[in-house]
Amino acid sequence: METKELHHYKTLVAKLPLLKKEIAKVIVGQQAAIDEILISLLAGGHCLLEGVPGLAKTLMVSTLSKALDMKFKRIQFTPDLMPGDIVGTEILEEDHETGKKFFKFNRGPIFANIVLADEINRTPPKTQAALLEAMQEYKVTYAGTNYDLPKPFLIIATQNPIEQAGTYPLPEAQLDRFLLYIKLGYPSENEELDVLKSTTGTNKPVLQTIMTDNDIIDLQKLTRQVHISEELIVKINHIVRATRPATTNSTYVKEWCEWGAGPRAGQALVLCAKARAVLNERFSVLPEDIEALAYPILRHRIALNFRAEAEGISTDDVIKDLLKK
């Protein structure tokens, strides 16, 4: 890496703490979730955000887009939402000079840098599947024509863990395409007190733009260049393979798991570990990066058997046991 390029990257990395500080003007607490969303963005993946209503999931995402000066779109998923409402539709237009009529593709809300898919489990599988190509290929195909999505591109889907009536659980294949599965918890007593004080008055924080879309693209390139030792890659491989009942030495996995994570989990763990290093202003991956990210990366890629669900065993319990060993 040339000296000029290295200086440019160091300047960008130094802005990341400022970015988190800017988001904290609006979002009280939830630091772990904010870090994980930023890791997902740096790694070039998408994330699923789960939490009860009122935990500022939507506000968190819109605040991030403002601090990054990126185009933000929110799609409210409902049972009657159609794929065309997401990707766009063709409309009939007329050329005023020639009088000829033609079809023009009218782009949907998916054409943004940050897309919030709010309550994704409220819409049928046909509409959920409309996101698949966009998430994986970073393009939309309509009537045989490909339309590239803007870069950087991040989908953050939310779902409510409480209400299950009238919902459509995401298929495993689509869950696997989410880089991280982030769970939001309730704020602490002091954090909740700060929320009550800061959101019920007249003061409204003014957000400054810390980074641009080009800055994020450069940081995504840097993330891939971060050093990770052969030993840590082997460790990641062991962790992922240990989640599979057929290849594990863990009695916990054999007893509670139906099937484990696929190769995409290992790729995600390497990339996200690199992204966490960048977020912490490092250019090398540490073991703590892997241990911190094992939960959001593996929890939606492990299927528990009926007995585990009956006993109240969660995927996080399985991951905790694996990391101990």
Image (cartoon, rainbow, N blue to C red):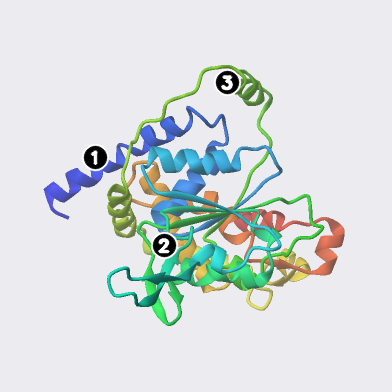
* Image label count: 3
Cα gap from disc 1 to disc 2, whole angstroms:
30 Å
Q: In which quarter of the image is the N terminus?
A: bottom left
- In the image, residue 230 above or below residue 71: below
Residue tagged by mark 2? 231
On screen, residue 116 versus residue 153, left or right, reads: right
In-front residue for pair 274/55: 55
The answer to whether residue 288 shows anywhere in this view is no
Tag 3, which secondary structure?
Answer: helix
Q: What residue type is labelled 3?
A: Ser
**Quick one: label 3 or label 1, which is nearer the N terminus?**
1
Vertical arrangement, residue 188 with respect to residue 33, above or below:
above
Helix, strand or loop under label 2: helix
The disc placed on residue 198 is 3
- Residue 250, above or below 313: below
| For marks 3 and 2 on the same chain, the one whose residue lies earlier in the sequence | 3
Q: Position of residue 269 (x, y in %)?
A: 48, 60
Please name the residue shown 39% across and 44% down the image.
Answer: 279
Q: Do the residues labelled 3 and 2 touch (CB within 8 Å)?
A: no
Q: Do the residues labelled 1 and 2 touch (CB within 8 Å)?
A: no
Indicate the amino acid at tag 2. Glu
Residue found 39% across the figure and 76% down from its top:
101
Query: Alpha-carbon neighbours of circle 2 within 10 Å: few (<14), some, or many (≥20)?
Result: few
Residue 168 lies, with reference to residue 8, above or below; the image says below
Say whether disc 1 or disc 2 marks the residue closer to the N-terminus: 1
Give how far across and how far down residue 170 sits, in percent: 67, 66
The amino acid at mark 1 is Thr
Residue at 57% x, 73% y is 262
Q: How crowded is mark 1: few (under 14 residues within 10 Å), some or many (20 or more)?
A: few
